[in-house]
Amino acid sequence: GIQTFSTNRQSDRSGLSNGFAQIMGEELGLLTERLKHGLNIEDIWSVSYGKGDYHSPHNHGSLGWAGILYLDLPKDSPGTSYIQPWNDIQNDTSIYHPVKVSEGQIIVVPQFVTHFSPPNKSNKKKRIISWDMQFLPS
């Protein structure tokens, strides 16, 4: 397969966005301050990676922002790698950046940035919450 992991993305998640926004109100408030624009959580889901599980390169669309909260990040488990949107100008190869993260950290990027999760090398589960946000109308 092109990916292996467990997720609740195909189940009913109604109400999760509001609860998450309440719990993460302070952090989301700092983000909207920095962006100087209000945001709305459009979708939210969880992902668990067992040993050897990975997520193939993908993006979340062309508009808005995508966030990841690292809930459980075992020692031998990789963070997310982001693929630069342009190739290296000297050798025309793709460039990707593994982001060093720790449990409890949040990463937010534009939804169009392609990213992936390399295989989890740990015997313990890596768990994240991921969400998509759109700008509120002005």
Image (spheres, rainbow, N blue to C red):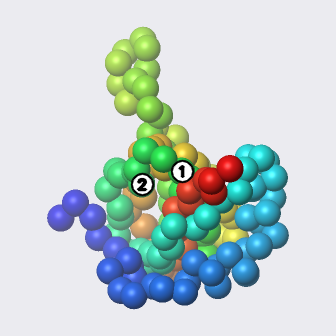
Q: Residue at x 73, y 81 (%)?
A: 23
User: In the displayed image of the protein, which residue is found farthest to the top?
Assistant: 90
Asked whether residue 68 appears in the rendered view, the answer is: no
Q: Are marks 2 and 1 in contact (CB under 8 Å)?
A: yes
Amino acid type shown at disc 2: His
**Front residue of 69 and 92:** 69
Residue 73 image point, x, y percent: 58, 71
Q: Is residue 112 left or right of residue 39?
A: left
Q: Which residue is mark 2?
A: 60
Sort mark 2 into few (<14), some (14-19) or many (20+) by Cα contacts within 10 Å.
some
**Front residue of 67 and 49:** 67
- State the quadrant of the N terminus: bottom left
Residue 126 image point, x, y percent: 50, 74
90 over 50 or under it: above or below: above
16 over 87 or under it: above or below: below
**Front residue of 98 and 9:** 9
**Front residue of 12 and 55:** 12
70 over 19 or under it: above or below: above
Residue 46 image point, x, y percent: 48, 77
Amino acid type shown at disc 1: Gly
Q: Which residue is mark 1?
A: 64
Residue 128 image point, x, y percent: 53, 73
Secondary structure under tag 1 reads loop
Mark 2 vs mark 1, foreground winner is 1
Q: Residue at x 49, y 70 (%)?
A: 43
Q: Is residue 99 left or right of residue 6?
A: right
Q: Residue at x 35, y 18 (%)?
A: 92
Sort mark 1 into few (<14), some (14-19) or many (20+) by Cα contacts within 10 Å.
some
Q: Is residue 128 left or right of residue 31?
A: left
Secondary structure under tag 2 reads loop
How many discs mark residues in the rendered view? Answer: 2
